[in-house]
Image: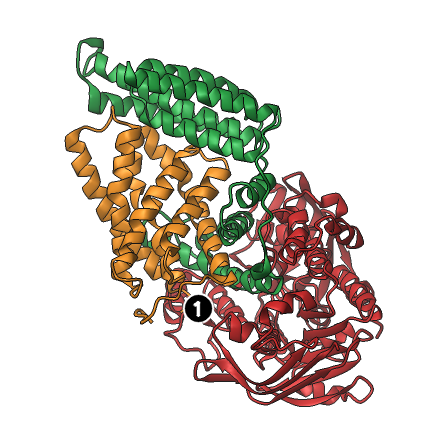
Amino acid sequence: MSGVEAEISGAGYGVKAILHDVRLSAKAGETLAVVGRSGVGKTTLMLSVTGVLDNLLGGWTRGKVSLAGLDPIKRDFKEVPRKIGIVLQDPDRQLAMPFVLDEVAFTLRNLGLPEKRAWGALLRFGLAHKAYAEVETLSGGEKRRLTLAASLVHEPEILILDEPSASIDPWGVGDLKRYVQTMAEKGLTILLIEHKLGFYRGVFDRILLLEAGSSTWAGSVEEADPRILEEHGVDYTLIGRPRERVFTGERVAFLRDCEFSYDGFTLRVDELDIRAGERIALIGPNGGGKTTLLKILGGFHRCSGEISVAGRAFYVPQHPDYLFVRPSVGDEVRDAREKGGHEPLGLPTGIDAGSSPYRLSHGQRRWLSLAIAHAFRPRLLLLDEPTTGLDLFLVEQLTDVLWRLSKSGLSIVFSTHDPRVVMSLADRVLLVADGRVSEIDVDEAISMMLEAMDIEI
Amino acid sequence: MKSDPTTLFIYALSVTVLSMVSRDPRVLLALALLNLPLGTYLGRKRGVIFFLLYFLGLFGIFLNSVAFSNQGTAVLDVGPLVVREGAVKAFLRVFLRLSSILGAALIFYGLADIRELLDALECTMRIPRGFVFSLAVGLRMLALLQRDAGEILEMRAQRGHSRRPLTPGSLSSFLRTLLSVALERGLWIGVAAELRGLSLRERRPRPYRPGLGDVVLLVLLALQLTITILSMVC
Amino acid sequence: MLVQTVPELRYSAVDYAILGVVAAVMGVVFVVAWDFYYLVKALLGPIGARVFTYGIWFMAAPLAASLVRKPLSAFSGEVLAALVETIIPTYGGYTNLIYGVAQGLASELAYLIFGYRRWGPLQAALSGALAGPVAVTLDQILFPELITAKTFAALVLAATASGALYGLIAYGVSRVRK
């Protein structure tokens, strides 16, 4: 029999329990969404039911788990790969082989299956023409499709997806949903771990809500109460909070006939003015030039034409880690104060100054990166996908802070794939696609993104 | 010419060893003449930057030759700098040795395909599967980490730190960030690989079947081996 | 935990992946240090360039062993880093692999003599230091014309001290997520 059943009365590492009381049930052919805010134990649950926690990471699970009829925690851990396919949050944290074809063949050779089957999977996910390409030359969306191809090529009974949309653009989300729906129609049992549930409406049958390591609610889509879900940081209705707009002061930066080329790609900006206090969203497909535009404004790329930025610009990368230079949070703050010349933004309580910045949660690291940027008192703050991987509460905290900073005259340019952030933060939207930049209406931008993701409001 | 990666691996490794152990200038000349022109031809697509750096390095070798082996009759006398016979001989010998090592490497780079090499390491050369997996991950991560490294250095500059992390302190700082990002990826790549059956993997041995390209290289190698041994015996 | 009672022998998929990470990280460090290396090499020659970068070339072993605390991790880390450097075109070609295997064996000794029970800063420094004499010996074989008996002794000292320093750095960096 297929499906996943788990009754877990405790799971964690050493003396620390992360899960306390979780009952999970997905019958064969069902699609179950496991939801809850960051840090409630969604990923630990995934590691526990696959046996990875106990057999690979030195952790422990108390309770009973049945995965496609196997006992993954004790007896059958080695057999788990034959029954499941797994897709993790970031393709770069999953793809192991340097070349496309080998990534799919890896699964097949491990399981002793004929390697020529890889071609079928590549065709199905639109990657056959890139079979011999280096994985690093693929776009974000293509890498996501490659993880799907490599996870489904052996025809597993169960598919587990851990926040699969965190790193892809709206068009990629639309593709992903269609693939997951096809798998569901084929009868696969699917576990979808997510906090942006609203992106997946119509895809899942049942919901399991986690809070602080325990399951607090489970039921069908029809029974779900959006209000309760949103109180638990799960975004169900996808309604951003629109705020008061358009505060335009003096001009802070401008670009005229600016052109920048690298590796055969050219980004062209005919005209762009940025005024004090403006919040400008950059949207568009991955690889279209959003990061390049941010880096031009940040002074990292020199472009032809005219460019002028009054005062300092500061760029905060998508991976906040890139910005850290010191071994502890306290040292980071001191270093930023010394080099930036001003007091950094205050950090939320609960962050230990002695802790390594790399040990903080993703949300805390994001916060620290903003605190550092603030110490340099930029006139222009450049944020590359600042809300990736943040849950509803954290997104709201972040947009609150950014909104406050912009009221004091700071101009903010940010790239995003999230229509909620556009809705709650953007005064203006620039569509950056295929190396071209064009201004579009905010509402038009939001409906374009929702349409790409195949979401009806 | 198509050669098995196993042959190329053995060829380049053996020529490098021979070049390192040979002391006879005639042998070094023979090895260099056999490998450098062929390597330059085969590796021309990959090697432009190579040759630039190579000729840059020659100047340094010359300086070292003057510094460490400047004995014998003077060959060149320019004021404070007197270049003696010993320095010229030393320079020539080092130059020839490095030429054959570079030539052999270029033959490998010109003919070997990384995909086939990984497969040959596992199936023909019988290197343990876990080790070959590590190497594949290393090559995959290298492309990713080069991008990361560029970003990290830009961010360091933005924060008022050195862009070139060469002192022990700045190297630690740079490496902490790079390693942190890389380790997080490595952990999940390991988890995913296990869930995709890495420990169920069985080797599919493939016997070594040399073709024409392999025979040519093996004959060339045998020739160089003979020359080296003869020079040592005679 | 710096002391283990019984050494664990079996490598998991995560261990193998981390060894791959070490190889790639060292590959990047060499690329970052590369132009510096060539500048020094043009100014001070191959011997001078080696003195200035010695310890960096020995870091893979202590870094791998500090992260994957199992027998042969130091050796594997060093050899993998050398293989990566051999496969992506680098100037040294297959000398990288020869140096890697020899240095890896020497570095592994630092953990072996402690019975694979200690993986602390002392062992990491020792692991880097032990690679020094081996590397200089190989240099002597590669550049016999350039290394006299007197310079040989001085180079061994320099390489050993530099190896110990960078071994310590490798240990410190390995604690980043601890």
Q: Can residue A241 be seen here? A: no
The chain coloured orange is C
Q: Return the residue at label 1.
A: A357
Q: Tell me the residue at 31%/29% (across/down).
A: C142
Horizontal side of residue A62 vs A350, given as left or right = right
Q: Tell me the residue at 33%/72% (across/down).
A: C1
Q: Secondary structure at mark 1?
A: helix
Q: Can residue A162 be seen here? A: yes
**Up/down of B178 relative to A361, above or below:** above
The chain coloured green is B
Residue B36: x and y in percent read 46, 20
Chain under callout 1: A
- Front in this rendered view, residue A146 or A61: A61
The chain coloured red is A
Q: Quadrant of the C terminus of chain B?
A: top left
* Residue type, label 1: Pro
Q: Tell me the residue at 25%/26% (across/down).
A: C144
- Front in this rendered view, residue B177 or B233: B233
| Neighbourhood count class around disc 1 (C-alpha, 10 Å): few under 14, some 14–19, many 20 upward | many
Residue C35: x and y in percent read 41, 37
**Up/down of B39 relative to A239, above or below:** above
Horizontal side of residue A449 vs B2, given as left or right = right
Residue C106: x and y in percent read 29, 48
Quarter of the image where one finds residue B55: top left
Horizontal side of residue B214 vs A231, given as left or right = left
Q: Quadrant of the N terminus of chain B?
A: top right
- Front in this rendered view, residue B15 or A255: B15
**Up/down of B62 relative to C70, above or below:** above
Horizontal side of residue B215 vs B54, given as left or right = right
